[in-house]
Image (cartoon, grey):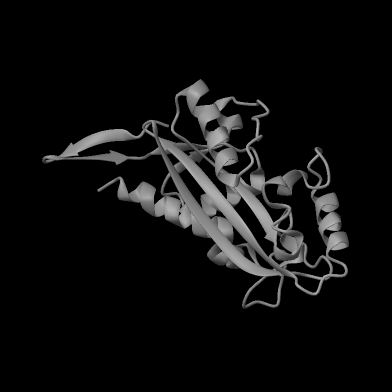
């Protein structure tokens, strides 16, 4: 996706028509497309013919997100964004954090990840946690970052059939339901990813003026 530079009087601006989202995670892709509501054509890795296992070896969410975006940008010369998300639990010293996807092992098994968290939290009275998403965007060779976070608590047991990852054990502040019990529309109004994507979308759409 190359943003197209256009001139308007003495001003220059970019109309961003296409962006690669450095993921093949269908859940993430659907969430971001729903939040952007068709304003930008979002393409997945598979849609540009990228089937590589992109490394995520940084020790921060920001580092992982940028690593993924740069991998695509360097190889395909397409404007690209990537995200990384972590569940940060106060009683566990901020874990699983950057290791959220592989907390219970390299196979990235969401069920095992949730069970590990619940096991470690079994005797904890402090169940405060937050989800944090960082988006790294490479646009016309420039790097930008957008962050979204939402606080809540870890449920005593999984609840709900929706969502993915840790959604069924995370209850956002102000709600009694887990993310997995909320509708996709409700979650997309308040989630950490929604907050980051809205900041990202506002930035992208401002390039048209």
Q: How many marks?
A: 0
User: Closest to the observer: 10 or 26?
Assistant: 10
Seen from the viewer's position, the closer of residues 115 and 46 is: 115
Q: Position of residue 44 (x, y in %)?
A: 57, 36
The front one of 110 and 163 is: 110
Q: Residue at x 60, y 56 (%)?
A: 132
Q: Is residue 90 left or right of residue 30?
A: right
- Residue at image position (64%, 30%) is 54
Q: Is residue 127 above or below residue 149?
A: below
Residue 24 at x, y percent in the picture: 64, 37
Side of 10 relative to 104 (left or right): left
Residue located at (45% from left, 28% from top) = 78
Q: Is residue 196 left or right of residue 184?
A: left
Q: Residue 79, how many percent across, how many down?
A: 43, 33
Quadrant position of residue 65: top right
* Residue found at the far top of this picture: 75
Q: Is residue 104 left or right of residue 3?
A: right
Residue 98, given in percent of the width and then of the height, sits at: 67, 47
77 to 58, vertically: above or below: above
- Identity of the residue drawn at 44% across and 50% down: 200
Q: Quadrant of residue 172?
A: bottom right
Placement of the N terminus among the 4 image quadrants:
top left
In this view, which residue lies farthest toward the left?
Answer: 9
Seen as rendered, the residue at the extreme front is 93
**In the image, is residue 141 above or below residue 95?**
above
Residue 126 figure quarter: bottom right
């Amino acid at each position: 996706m190359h943003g197209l530079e256009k001139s308007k009087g003495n001003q220059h601006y970019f109309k961003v028509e296409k962006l690669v989202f450095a993921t093949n995670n269908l859940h993430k892709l659907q969430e971001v497309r729903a939040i952007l509501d068709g304003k930008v054509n979002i393409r997945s890795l598979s849609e540009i013919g990228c089937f590589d296992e992109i490394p995520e070896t940084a020790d921060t969410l920001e580092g992982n997100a940028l690593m993924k975006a740069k991998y695509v940008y360097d190889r395909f010369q397409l404007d690209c964004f990537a995200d990384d998300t972590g569940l940060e639990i106060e009683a566990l010293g901020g874990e699983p954090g950057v290791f959220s996807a592989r907390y219970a092992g390299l196979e990235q098994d969401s069920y095992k990840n949730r069970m590990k968290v619940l096991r470690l939290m079994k005797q904890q009275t402090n169940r405060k946690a937050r989800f944090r998403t960082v988006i790294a965007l490479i646009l016309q060779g420039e790097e930008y970052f957008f962050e979204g976070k939402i606080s809540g608590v870890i449920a005593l047991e999984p609840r709900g059939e929706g969502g993915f990852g840790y959604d069924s054990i995370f209850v956002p502040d102000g709600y009694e339901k887990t993310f997995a019990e909320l509708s996709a529309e409700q979650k997309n109004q308040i989630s950490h990813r929604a907050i980051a994507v809205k900041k990202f979308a506002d930035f992208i759409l401002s390039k048209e003026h």
